Image (cartoon, helix red, strand yellow):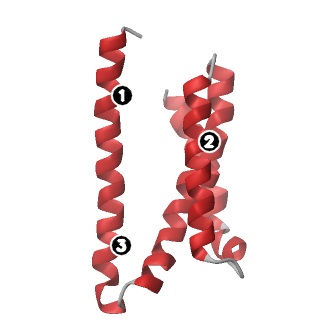
């Protein structure tokens, strides 16, 4: 799994480094919707992956899912939230992302235990 985590990080870097060029002229809400679709497709691909190779291929969507979300949420919040509350909004957005990740890991662990995978 360590290789998979390193692979996902490598997939995120180009999107994060080139986000300002990629996002130019595009609506941030559209980028967030694209990220949502990539998250859904990645989750489906991971659930249906029959082996490690397909699992790695599914994780190539990390660039379009989490990396795009991480970069697009900041300008989105800057648009919809008053600038005086921008730091609180960004903190809340990433706190809920972290909480969701921890909660999903706990649920997945319990599912693994119950289903004896």
Q: Tell me which label, 3 or 1, sits earlier in the chain.
A: 3
Give the quadrant of the C terminus: top left
State yes or no: discs 3 and 2 in contact (Cβ < 8 Å): no
Q: Residue 66, how many percent across, how many down?
A: 53, 53
SS for callout 2: helix
Read off the residue under disc 3: 90
Q: Please give the name of the residue rendered at 50% of the width and 79% of the height, measured from the top-left corner.
A: 75
State yes or no: discs 2 and 1 in contact (Cβ < 8 Å): no
Which of discs 3 and 2 lies nearer the camera? The answer is: 2
Nearer-the-camera pick, 21 or 102: 102
What is the residue that sits farthest to the top in this orientation? Answer: 116
Dividing the picture into quadrants, the one containing residue 20 is bottom right
Read off the residue under disc 2: 41
Nearer-the-camera pick, 66 or 79: 79
Residue 40 position (above or below residue 82): above
Q: Please give the name of the residue rendered at 49% of the width and 77% of the height, measured from the top-left corner.
A: 76
Read off the residue under disc 1: 108
Count of residue discs: 3
State yes or no: discs 3 and 1 in contact (Cβ < 8 Å): no
SS for callout 3: helix
Q: Please give the name of the residue rendered at 49% of the width and 30% of the height, measured from the top-left corner.
A: 2
Q: CA distance from mark 3 to mark 2?
A: 26 Å
Q: Residue 72, how many percent across, how many down?
A: 54, 69
Residue 102 position (above or below residue 52): below
Dividing the picture into quadrants, the one containing residue 97 is bottom left
Q: Please give the name of the residue rendered at 30% of the width and 31% of the height, measured from the top-left corner.
A: 107
């Amino acid at each position: 799994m360590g290789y998979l985590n390193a692979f996902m990080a490598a997939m995120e870097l180009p999107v994060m480094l080139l986000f300002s060029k990629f996002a130019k002229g595009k609506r941030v809400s559209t980028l967030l919707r694209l990220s949502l679709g990539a998250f859904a497709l990645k989750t489906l691909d991971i659930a249906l992956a029959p082996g490690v190779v397909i699992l790695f291929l599914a994780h190539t969507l990390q660039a379009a899912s989490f990396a795009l979300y991480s970069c697009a949420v900041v300008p989105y919040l800057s648009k919809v939230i008053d600038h005086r509350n921008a730091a609180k909004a960004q903190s809340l957005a990433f706190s809920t992302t972290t909480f969701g990740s921890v909660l999903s890991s706990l649920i997945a662990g319990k599912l693994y235990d119950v289903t004896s995978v």
